[in-house]
Image: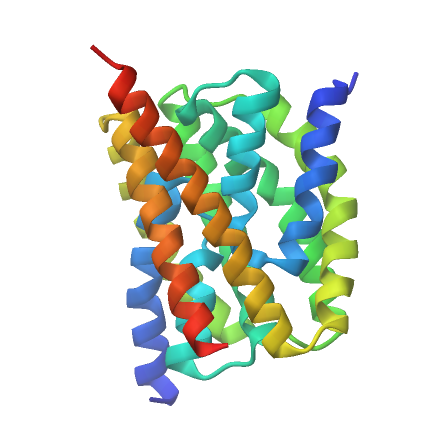
Amino acid sequence: VLDPKLAAIGIGGGPSVGAARGGRRGRDGAAARALASYGQRDAHAISLGAIIPISIAGIATYGIAGEVRWWDALALAAGSIVGAQVGAGILTRIDERLLKVIFGTFLIAVAALLGTKA
Amino acid sequence: VSGPTLYVTLAAFGVLVGVASGLLGVGGGTLAVPFLTLAVGLSQHAAEATSLLVILPTAIAGSLALRRYGVGNLSVALRIGTVGAVGSVLGALLALALTGGTLRIVFAVFIGIVGLRLVRDGLVSEQRSP
C-alpha cells in the first residue's frame, strides 16, 4: 500500500517544512528522482501535490502558536494562484537541464542573501 | 508600506511566487520568506508560518494545472504527503523552539545546499549530453 521508498521521502522531507520552510519541494524533487527514478518534471509535480497535506499539518501547528498572518497570506496567495498557472504552462516547454541550473542558482542566491541578514 | 498598499504589493509579489512555484517546483517559501522578513518586516517564525499558508492554494492550483498537462502522479504525491504531514508537525514544533536568527541560518543553509546540488546536476547532465 505504501512503498517504503515513498514513505522514506515523506519522513525525510516533512520536518523541513517547519525547520527550513522553503526547500521542501526541492528536497522532495531530489528525493523522488533519486529513490523512485522519476524525471525532473514528474518529480516537481509529485512534490507539488505532496505539499498539500503537509502544509495543512504545518499551518495548523503554527496557527495554534499564533504565528500565521492570515491577511498577508491571503494577499500573497491571490497573486500566486495566477502565477502558478503561468509557471506550470511554461514548465512543459522548457529544457530540463536549464531548469535545474535556474532553480539551483536561484536557491543559492536566496541562501546568500539570507545569510548576510541573519 | 501598510494597509491597502501592502496588500496590493503582496498580491503582486504573489504572482511572482506563483510563477516560480509552477515553473521551478520551488516551494513558495524560497521567495516569500525572504520577502516577508526583509521587505515586510515579519519575524522569521511569522514569515515561515505565513508562507506555509500561501503555498497551500498555490500547490493546489499548480497540481491541477500540471495534471491537465499529464505531468506527475497524484497517488504517489498524496502517499508521500500523508507520511510527511507527521514530520511537518514535528518540524513546526522544532522551528517554534528555535530563535529567529538560528531559524534563518538553518533556512539559508538548507536551501543553499539544495541549490548547489541542482546546479551541479544540471551542469553535469549538460556536459554529458551530445
Front one among B38 and B2: B38
Quadrant (top left, top right, bottom left, bottom right) of the C terminus of chain B? top left
Front one among A116 and A87: A116
Image location of residue A28, percent across then percent down: 57, 36
Question: Is residue A92 visible in the rendered structure shown here?
Answer: no
Considering every residue shown, the one lying at the far top of the view is B130
Residue sitting at 41 percent across and 78 percent down?
Answer: B38
Which color scheme did the rendering employ for the protein?
rainbow
Depicted A77 relative to depicted A1: above or below: below
Quadrant (top left, top right, bottom left, bottom right) of the N terminus of chain B? bottom left
Residue sitting at 76 percent across and 63 percent down?
Answer: B94
Question: Is residue A12 visible in the rendered structure shown here?
Answer: yes
Image location of residue A81, percent across then percent down: 38, 51
Q: Quadrant of residue B69?
A: top left
Q: Is residue B119 left or right of residue B86?
A: left
Image location of residue A16, percent across then percent down: 65, 51
Front one among A62 and A19: A19
Q: Quadrant of residue B44?
A: bottom right
Residue sitting at 60 percent across and 37 percent down?
Answer: A50
Q: Is residue B69 left or right of residue A49?
A: left
Q: How many marks?
A: 0
Front one among A49 and B25: B25
Residue sitting at 70 percent across and 66 percent down?
Answer: B95
Considering every residue shown, the one lying at the far bottom of the view is B2
Q: Is residue B57 left or right of residue A52?
A: left
Image location of residue A117, percent across then percent down: 44, 77
